[in-house]
Amino acid sequence: MAKPPRQGDKPKTINLDVEREALEREGYLQKRPAKTPQPDEEAIADDKLIMRLLAGFHVDERGREVTSYLQPNSVAEKKARTALARQLRDGTLSFFAKELLALAIDPSTPSPMPNMRPTRKIKFENPTRGNPSTWARDLAIIYFINRRRRTKSIEQAIGEAADHYGLERSRTWEIWTQYNKLVNPSAK
């Protein structure tokens, strides 16, 4: 268990770029591919789809600005979701789209834009029935084992990880083995 900071201790600062590089180097994260700029027409089409998804805003066939949302699970909605995810990952999402997305996630925090209110609501839920995903915990276990391996045997590191995370040693070995196969495909 971590000790609480003592009075006068400086808070630990984390350089996220250094942490990301370390996680990429150790195989926990994939390197992001270089961004390829979209042609202007594609970027504009994506922005329009995203605004229709988030705010229902679009121009109808008669040239009027109207509000009507995309049909749930339609091809257009799926394209809009794909465009939103791409721009979110690339860091190219427009200010208004970011603000609408933030309001959809947390409607109680006011927008810096005057009179801007939520137009949609996002509910976070498990994507499938059954047990929730454990990938984040498994990644933490792998990181824990890798750190312990610097000074201990793999058996000791896995045993400590099992105790620390409250798992059976066999499950911890399984997590480690799956990770090792991904990182070292030639290893048996």
Image: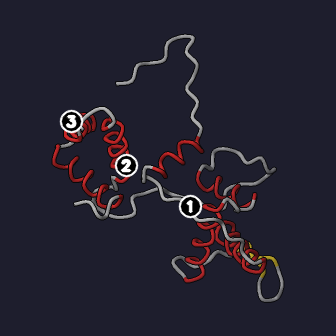
The residue drawn where x is 35% and y is 64% is 128
Helix, strand or loop at label 3? It is helix
Q: Identify residue type, mark 1.
A: Arg
Q: Indicate the amino acid at tag 2.
A: Leu
Q: Amino acid at mark 3?
A: Gln
User: Which quadrant, please, contains the C terminus?
Assistant: bottom left
185 w.r.t. 107: above or below:
below
Relative to 44, is 153 on the left or the right?
left
> How busy is the neighbourhood of tag 2: few (under 14 within 10 Å), some, or many (20 plus)?
some
Residue 105, relative to residue 76: is it above or below? above
**Residue 51 % position (x, y):** 71, 69
Residue 32: numbered disc: 1
Q: Are marks 3 and 2 in contact (CB under 8 Å)?
A: no
Which sits in the foreground, 67 or 143? 143
Residue beneath disc 2? 139
Mark 1 or 2, nearer chain start = 1
Query: Which part of the image, by quadrant, shows the N terminus?
Result: top left
> Sequence order check: which comes first, mark 3 or mark 2?
2
Q: Residue furthest front?
A: 186
Q: Which mark is residue 156?
A: 3
Q: Is residue 38 above or below residue 21?
A: below
How far apart are labels 3 and 2 at the CA level? 18 Å
- How many angstroms separate mark 1 from mark 3 (CA)? 34 Å
Counting other residues with Cα less than 10 Å from the Cα at mark 1, is it few (<14), some (14-19), or many (20 or more)?
A: few
Label annotation for residue 2:
none
Mark 1 or mark 3, which is nearer to you? 3
Whether residue 186 sits left or right of residue 93 in the image: it is left
The x, y position of residue 92, in whole percent, is 70, 62
* Upstream in sequence: badge 1 or badge 3: 1
